[in-house]
Image: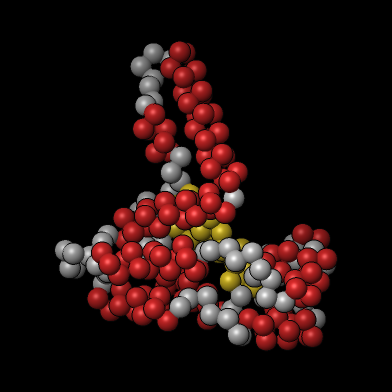
């Protein structure tokens, strides 16, 4: 392997750090929740230190435990899901477990899912759902497929970078950060806009907010 390649776990940590900043900008309460998490951990650690001789946790150690990031992304098409799988592989992340949400009675949702994380260092995880249009009636399924067919979650540049990673066995600094930027500026970024307001509202009214968000 080229010594100039950025290690996948380093890429992963940078990706999740930047995603965390992105989420903080989109949802201010996200940053506040991290601050509350730190203060709670600090309070518990201080209590344990007063009870158990020799027990000690520094602020740096507590901050380290707070660096775990659990995110979620919802995918609409099977080909998109395959590309997302290859995208996460560039960051040393693999699918773990399988969740079928389509057969849960009153709680059913039209998705199947898995969680991408690293076997070696599993502190970061992305719960990834795939929409199942066949869950709906024929007309709704057709409309969903038609709408999803007009979009592209990963840009051509992102796909080229993924293929370069697969062919070369890694990415150098500039390409690695370009692939990370694809995640923060496109793949995971919240647009705040429905591409079809009528369909979005209809799905929400029927209790399928997950499908509507996709």
Give me the residue at 73% from left, 84% from top: 143
Displayed quadrant of residue 138: bottom right
Q: Position of residue 77 (x, y in %)?
A: 59, 79
Give me the residue at 40% from left, 58% from top: 15
Q: Nearer the viewer, residue 195 or 113?
A: 195
Quarter of the image with the N terminus in it: bottom left
- Tell me if residue 109 can be seen: no
Q: Is residue 139 above or below residue 204?
A: below
Give me the residue at 52% from left, 64% from top: 188
* Side of 136 where 151 appears, left or right: left
Q: Nearer the viewer, residue 50 or 43?
A: 43
Q: Position of residue 139 (x, y in %)?
A: 79, 85
Displayed quadrant of residue 76: bottom right
Q: Nearer the viewer, residue 157 or 109?
A: 157
Q: Position of residue 21 (x, y in %)?
A: 47, 51
* Side of 59 where 169 appears, left or right: left
Quarter of the image with the C terminus in it: bottom right
Give me the residue at 24% from left, 67% from top: 172
Q: Position of residue 48 (x, y in %)?
A: 47, 19
């Amino acid at each position: 392997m080229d010594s100039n390649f950025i290690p996948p776990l380093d890429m992963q940590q940078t990706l999740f750090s930047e995603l965390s900043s992105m989420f903080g900008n989109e949802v201010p309460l996200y940053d506040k929740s991290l601050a509350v998490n730190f203060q709670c951990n600090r309070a518990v650690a201080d209590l344990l230190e007063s009870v158990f001789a020799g027990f000690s946790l520094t602020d740096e150690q507590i901050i380290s435990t707070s660096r775990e990031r659990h995110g979620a992304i919802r995918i609409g098409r099977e080909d998109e899901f395959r590309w997302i799988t290859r995208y996460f592989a560039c960051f040393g992340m693999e699918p773990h477990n399988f969740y079928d949400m389509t057969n849960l009675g009153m709680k059913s949702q039209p998705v199947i899912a898995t969680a991408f994380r690293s076997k070696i260092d599993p502190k970061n995880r992305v719960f990834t759902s795939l929409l199942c249009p066949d869950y709906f009636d024929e007309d709704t399924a057709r409309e969903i497929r038609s709408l999803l067919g007009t979009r592209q979650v990963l840009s051509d540049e992102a796909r080229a970078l993924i293929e370069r990673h697969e062919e070369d066995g890694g990415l150098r600094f500039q390409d690695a950060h370009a692939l990370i930027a694809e995640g923060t500026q496109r793949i995971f970024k919240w647009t705040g806009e429905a591409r079809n307001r009528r369909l979005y509202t209809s799905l929400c009214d029927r209790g399928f907010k997950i499908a509507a968000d996709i």
